[in-house]
Amino acid sequence: MFSKKITALDIGTSNIKIIYAVVSGRQARIKKQFIIDTPDGCILNGRITDAVALADLLNKFFKQNHFEPRDTVITFSSASFITRDMIIPKVPVKEIHGMIEMELPQNFPVSLDNHVWDYKVIEEIQSANGMNYRVLVAAVPQYFAAEYMQLAMACNMNLLSLDFSCNSVAELIKQDYYKKLDTAPYQTIMAMDFGSSSTKVTIVSKGMFMFHRILPFGGMHITQAIMKHMNVDEQGAEILKKEIGIDIVGEDELIPEMSQSIQVSDCIRAVLIEMFEDLSRFFDYYNSRQNENIDFVLLTGGGAQLKNLEQYLENTYNIPTKIYAVYSNVKATDTQKLSENALYLTNSIGALFNK
């Protein structure tokens, strides 16, 4: 089978995930994998705000690691990225673009005159009037696309695609998770990518991308709450998140160590309660639109390392929940490093299959 060498970059507010892989069909072998800090002030809501500093960082990094990116896919996240689910009559492929273009004003909340948009046919559906296409249409401001294209040129990359992180993780779930026997009963899967400043929620049903939402809560908000209430620095707060998390301790057995555990747990729970209120509204909206429930939840992203988050979410919604850190269709030259980085690499790995 034909294989191709691809570099995937997942560019976030706090860090940049970079992988270099050989992709063959639905399989990938990662040759190199890196996670580097994003320079302060370079990325704001997915937008590149300091292109010079970002390009300089990447070029120096590639040179120091004897690494030429070449064919590259870039994935990012932003509240400015708009998607809409549309139903159009089934028409010849060459007519789909024009058909969607006529329907855009009725489906998008803003004018797309200054946006770049694209579409993907999700499925064919039968209606009383004949066969239709369900299409996912995505739009991003022109300046977003221009900034990433300029970054690619400055780093001597051949940009194959620019993709939204929710679409990338949906593609990975489609290529990987639906192939596993232990998930066969679960038709509708929700992936929650706990990032630094936000949490990306993606729903995949029967292997098809259905919906996404960005919740304005991330690991940074939990860290800041612990820093404020426990009077510790950022490093201390991160340690408390991973070592104590949201443990539940009986108040009648208070000792100094347990008292700290309860305080940390209360800080975290306060943030999660607010976040889960948004998530509950998202559940209700999706259920009203699609008339189906979420069967399974996958947790990924650095924030998923919060101790007991998996069990806490499962108890809250009574939905089976699992950390998503093992990919059946992805191998690596350095398997130990992939195991350590897996939670952070979901989007960049998914982008390999969505080029």
Image (cartoon, rainbow, N blue to C red):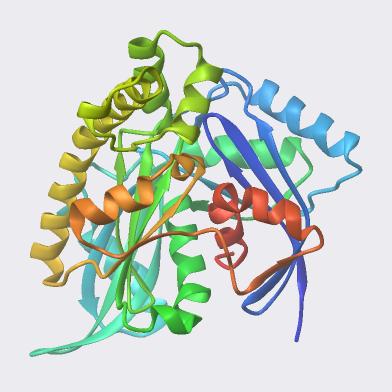
Left or right relative to 253: residue 264? right
Residue at the image point whose x is 28% and y is 37% from the top: 248
Tell me the quadrant of the picture where the N terminus can be found: bottom right
Q: Give the quadrant of residue 339.
A: bottom right
Q: Is residue 65 above or below residue 261?
A: below
Q: Is residue 180 above or below residue 119?
A: below
Residue 323 visible in the picture: yes
Left or right relative to 211: residue 221? right
Observer-nearest of 294 and 24: 294
Residue at the image point whose x is 16% and y is 60% from the top: 286
Residue 270 visible in the picture: no
Q: Is residue 351 above or below residue 44?
A: below
- Residue 340, image x and y in percent? 66, 49
Left or right relative to 216: residue 302? right
Residue at the image point whose x is 44% and y is 78% from the top: 178
- Residue 162, image x and y in percent? 55, 51
Observer-nearest of 30 and 163: 30
Tell me the quadrant of the picture where the C terminus can be found: bottom right
- Residue 235, image x and y in percent? 56, 19
User: How many labels, in total?
Assistant: 0
Residue at the image point whose x is 21% and y is 42% from the top: 276
Observer-nearest of 100 and 226: 226
Observer-nearest of 43 and 307: 307
- Residue 36, image x and y in percent? 69, 34
Q: Is residue 241 above or below residue 237?
A: below
Q: Give the quadrant of residue 246.
A: top left
